[in-house]
Every structure is written in structure tokens, then in C-alpha cells.
Image: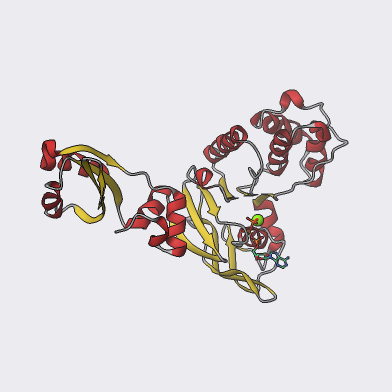
Amino acid sequence: MTKYMVITRNLTKRFGKITAVDRLNLEIRRGEVYSLLGPNGAGKTTTIRMLVGLLLPDEGEIYIDGIDAIKYPQKIKRVIGYMPQFFSLYPDLTVYENMEFFARIYNLPYHIKKERIRYLLELVQLWEHRDKLAGALSGGLKKRLSLAVVLLHDPKLIVLDEPTAGVDPPLRRLFWRYFRRLQKEGKTILVTTHYMDEAELADRIGLMSRGRLIAVGTPREIKRMVYNGDVMRIVAKTDEVEPILNNCSFIKRILSKRKLADKIEYKIVVDDFSLAIPRLATKLKDLALLIEPVNITLEDAFIKLTVGEEALGWGE
Ligand SMILES: Nc1ncnc2c1ncn2[C@@H]1O[C@H](COP(=O)(O)OP(=O)(O)OP(=O)(O)O)[C@@H](O)[C@H]1O
Ligand SMILES: [Mg+2]
């Protein structure tokens, strides 16, 4: 058994002149919540559709749970639970009947079926709503029912394409709580999004732009890629601090210097802010009025990694 649930090698898909997915090398570890993050048209859906066997790649390889997914599309169907962006439920069936209907498609044996349906409806907090018509549910409840349907055959890998697009923040948080529950059961979760704040909740992020993976890492790692370290802000009484800062071996760079009324502000890059704070406090003593880490957002990281540092507006 390999460490990875999903591996792609040079995965490529073209539509006419557009290369929607361009030599993508994806590695998703077993048991992680992995977020594929990218703007509209980045190639997220095209990637997902190839992974789940709905679209044949022009080039490249896909391995899911160690199985060659292009050679054995039937085998991987059992492994994957796929929730497309627009999942079709049967509006004239109740919540429970929808679950029963899909359970039949998956050929779940009777005794497993009843238990599984109850378990899943409880997981997505729809058990009390089981007799309501699916068509009468709010958008959020429909999404929760779709998730439950996708989990019926107990897939090892759950693939969700923008499950939280257009839903309100409380439901988004709820979905992430479900993901963590599923992860505890040993599932691997691949979720696409273009919400940066949502991607921060993932174990690892794959940043996609124009069909390519431009950065992969934990949210913190990706943010650290922007300046190759942690950014800190120091507000000082005078620029007497400057020679001291220049002599600190743990400071990698002074990013910027700015006058603020009677004070002066520096932004610096250090390896690790938690180690730098006490050291700076000792070195600068009462010359420093404020020493604090600067929160780099994923959005900053995305801009930097796609178009360059100057777009952030606070370089030298
Ligand atoms: N069936 C298709 N025929 C032609 N072009 C397509 C097709 N599917 C996708 N594309 C193009 O491929 C590129 C990638 O699209 P894709 O839907 O994979 O992006 P995405 O990251 O999912 O975007 P979104 O955030 O809007 O869902 C886009 O330029 C899109 O127009
Ligand atoms: Mg898409």
C-alpha cells in the first residue's frame, strides 16, 4: 500500500487550443484533507473529472488507491465518492427515499443499507428531516443530502467539486466539520474551492493556476513561500533600531521601512516568528514600541506566486 491515495503524472487535457490541465503532478496522501485551490478556469473541475473517470486525459497517468485509473475505471468507481458541483437529487422523493434509491444503484445489501442510511443522515444532521421531499429542502440541506448520498457505498476517497460554492459561511463551516469527522474514519478528502479562507482549513493545499500546480504545502508553508520565512512588523521610536536590525543574524531581510508620524515601522523576514520575538525584544529593548508577526494571507501568497511580489505593494 502506497502512502498516496491519488497520484497523477503529467496529467494533461486540452480542449481545442486551451490546455485546461497542463502536465499536472498531484500527490494526495492517504487520510488527508487536500484542497485544490484556484481561480475560475484554473482547471480544477477538469482535473477532478479525469480523476473520477468521467473524462479521458490526453496524456499522463492516474493512480488511485494504487490502481491505474485509466486502465481500470470500473475498479476505482468503488473507491471514490464523487460530488459534482451540481448534484441531482430526486425532488419528488423524500430525503430517505433518495438515500434508498441511490443505495439500490450501489447494490447495498438490505441489512447494511438501513444502518448505513441512518448513520449518514445522522452525520449530516438530516435524520429528523428524513420524511421531507428533497425538492422542498433549502440549498444548504440539499448539499448535505448530496454529501450523504455520495458516502453511501463507503468510499475511501471523497472528491467534492466546490461543495460550498454559493452556500453561506455557517454551512461552509459545517461541511468542514463533516470532513474532519470523515477523516477520523480514515477517509481521504479532495475538495476544490476558490475561497481562500476555506482552503486554509485544509491539511494541504495545491495552488492551481492555468492548468498547472504552482505550489503545494500546508497553509503555513504556502504563506511562507511568499517571503521565504515569516514576516514581522516592528514599530520603533527612531531609526536607531536600524543598525541593530542589520546586525541580527536571524533577520533574513528588511522588507520595508515607513515613517508613521513620530514613529517608524519596519517589516522584516525571519525564519520563525516565535523564536524571533524574544530575541528581538532583548536586542531592541525600549527602542521598540511594538513587535508582532504579520499575517500573510493565502491571497497574498496566490498573487505573489502567480504574478510576482510587486503586486502586493509592500516590497522595498
Ligand atoms: N468541455 C469543455 N470544452 C471546452 N473547454 C472547456 C471544457 N471544460 C473546461 N473547459 C475550459 O478549460 C479551462 C479549465 O476549466 P475548468 O472548468 O476545469 O476550471 P475550474 O478551475 O473548475 O474553474 P471554476 O472555478 O470556474 O469551476 C477553462 O478555460 C474552460 O473554459
Ligand atoms: Mg470548476
Locate ligand 2 by image quadrant: bottom right
Residue 119 drawn above or below residue 195: above
Q: Residue furthest right?
A: 92
Picture quadrant of residue 97: top right
Residue shown at the point (47%, 45%) measured from the top left: 200
Q: How many marks?
A: 0
Picture quadrant of residue 140: top right
Residue shown at the point (39%, 51%) measured from the top left: 223
Locate residue 305, reporting x and y percent: 43, 61
Query: Is residue 293 rendered to the left or right of residue 32?
Result: left
> In this rendering, does residue 27 appear at all?
no
Locate residue 123, reporting x and y percent: 64, 31
Residue 303 drawn above or below residue 219: below
Q: Residue furthest bottom?
A: 17
Residue shown at the point (70%, 44%) measured from the top left: 150
Residue shown at the point (69%, 36%) measured from the top left: 144
Query: Is residue 310 rendered to the left or right of residue 42?
Result: left
Along the viewing direction, whichever of 199 and 2 lies nearer the viewer: 199
**Quarter of the image where the C terminus is located:** bottom left
Along the viewing direction, whichever of 44 and 152 lies nearer the viewer: 44
> In this rendering, does residue 53 appear at all?
yes
Locate residue 188, reporting x and y percent: 55, 47
Locate residue 155, reporting x and y percent: 65, 46
Picture quadrant of residue 182: top right
Along the viewing direction, whichever of 177 and 305 lies nearer the viewer: 305
